[in-house]
Image (spheres, rainbow, N blue to C red):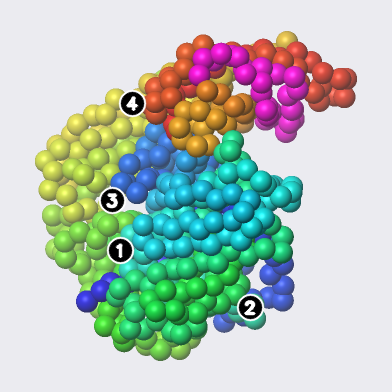
Amino acid sequence: MKKNILFVLAGMIMFTSCKKDPIVEDLTPPIDTTRNFINVNTSVAGQVVDINNAAISDATVSFGTETTTTDANGIFKFENVTVPENRAFVKVQKAGFFHGSRTFFAYANQRSNIKISLLEKIIQGTVGASGGTVTTPEGVKLEFPANAIADANGNLYTGTVEVAAQYLDPTVDNLSLIMPGDLRGITTDNVEEGLTSYGMVAVELLGSSGELLNVADGKTVQLTMPVASGQTSSAPVEIPLWFFDETNGVWKEEGKATLQGNEYVGEVAHFTFWNCDVNWDLIYLDGSVLLEGLSLEGANVCLNFDSGQGWEYTACDVTNSGGIFSGQVPTNTTFTLNIYPAGYTNCGDAIYTAEVGPFTTDMTLDPINIDPSAVIDNSMNVSGTLVDCDNNPIVNGYAKIKLGWAQYYAYTTDGTIDYTFTHCGTATDVEITAVDLDDFTQSDATLFTASSTVDFGELQGCISLAQYIIYDYNGTTFTLTESVSLFDSLGTGVGYHYLYGSDANQNSCSLQAIIDGPGTFDVIGFYFSTANGTFVNGTDMTVTVDQYSAVIGETNSGTFIGNIDDPNGGGTLPITGSWKAIRQF
């Protein structure tokens, strides 16, 4: 039986995208739903990883109007952000990867937990002004007519264009981690419906310096998408095409594709994630999970149901800090509800199973109480205190808990940790590390004997990363040591480089230049912003690279000098600075 991850309930565990043409559309008239959704004040925490589950640090993450970066463990956290409860949207950007994202249902004064896996930008081929065809190993084909590509200003691009593309097989088990948003879409009639994917692809067009390009106005590119082997018997003759709108975090219907053999063929006028989907009616479903009367955070709740075509669909969600799972599922369907001890990855047998549905209207299930005997070997409570270098409580941080191959993250706003979770490891030791997100420091990893209760006492986070950006401007010195990152757009160590850093006081700095080794280079773009909202651009600047390495994980360093616009309107002011950063890509 083939398993399809059809649709993630609250979007707790999904992922990627790429921004090509900016797609911003008015969502009026109101989307047709059976429920009145409101804006809520909520929190979210999560981890960003690559396709091999390795943590991705220094990724830029946005949620509502807030932005942060992932730490060395790929962790990010937002507290008390106002977002639409039915479409809370987390977006991740990192050089060398397609954009990642997750759309989920948020609850007031609760923290949701998500995981996003980024897809690497793989160059599948090149085309020129005369057109051409690029094909991925899986059989996705892009056929470009002549004069079909434009730059960001709409001017015809005549140089060589690199085509980055990644196919997403809709039958793989990790689809919900690597795809953008969730599987809800807005039809051309402006109705929100659920989607069943028959194939997805992410595409970006890159110029000679790594700049993003677009499909030219009035042109289209023919897209051919293979149908997965497990879906050929149910593939409709004609299927809607959907693109992912990164502004609103939702799929939108645009065009159709026709079945030709075992492939869908259609035309697209811009590039982002594209998806071949059939759509169906939705109802809203939620519930809560308790263990010994307390909310169980991080449990993996899955709904399985028969596709009627020889395989099984699965929709999953990870319970939030209130033990709640939620989302939208198809109407008139009977589900098998399974709860597993580990979030994101099912392990071992379910600790709870029940049949629910069918439903014709929105439904809240009765609270689910897990039998303690079902998790006697798979439950742990970790408690203790996290302090900073001055022995003050860490008010924006977490405890990283490593148990065998699995890692868990217990967040704190007052330094105290009291975290109960279910797991599926058999490790005899548990490794705990304190992390301070304000000072960007951490403790040494400390080993404790694994048991149902682990009290780690007090951990002090004082180890800093050896990265910085320091600059002098108008008699003031700024020292940025947080979220310092260096990468290039092509991931080759040459070309368009981006240097960024910030500090705990919300000062930040960004520098861009085309660099190919040690030496002095013109700065293409420079700005810094301060906590009071001042935003300053640089002019006539150069950057000198003294220590250079194209190898990921090695240190680069140097200086920069030039002028910046006087924020008070007095012409320009001189600026000098130095930097040291570890190459990310």
Residue 417 placement (x, y as % from top left): 35, 40
In magenta stretch: residue 521: yes
Residue 173: give its label.
Answer: 1
How far apart are the two marked residues, 1 and 4, measured between alpha carbons? 35 Å
Q: What's under tag 1, amino acid-wise?
A: Asp
Residue 188: give its label.
Answer: 2
How far apart are the two marked residues, 3 and 1, measured between alpha carbons? 27 Å
Q: Is residue 357 left or right of residue 487?
A: left
- Report the front residue among 9 and 213: 213
Which type of secondary structure does the marked residue at label 3 adopt? Answer: strand
Compared with 425, 144 (above or below) is below
Q: What's under tag 3, amino acid-wise?
A: Thr
| Labels 1 and 4 touching (C-beta < 8 A) | no
Q: Is residue 294 left or right of residue 373?
A: right
Residue position marked by numbered label 4 in the rendering = 443
Residue ID at (39%, 33%): 72
- Which is nearer the N-term, disc 2 or disc 4? 2
- Which is nearer the N-term, disc 4 or disc 3? 3
- Depth-wise, is mark 2 or mark 4 nearer the camera? 2
- Which is nearer the N-term, disc 2 or disc 1? 1
Residue ID at (66%, 17%): 542
Q: Is residue 136 visible?
A: yes
Residue position marked by numbered label 3 in the rendering = 420
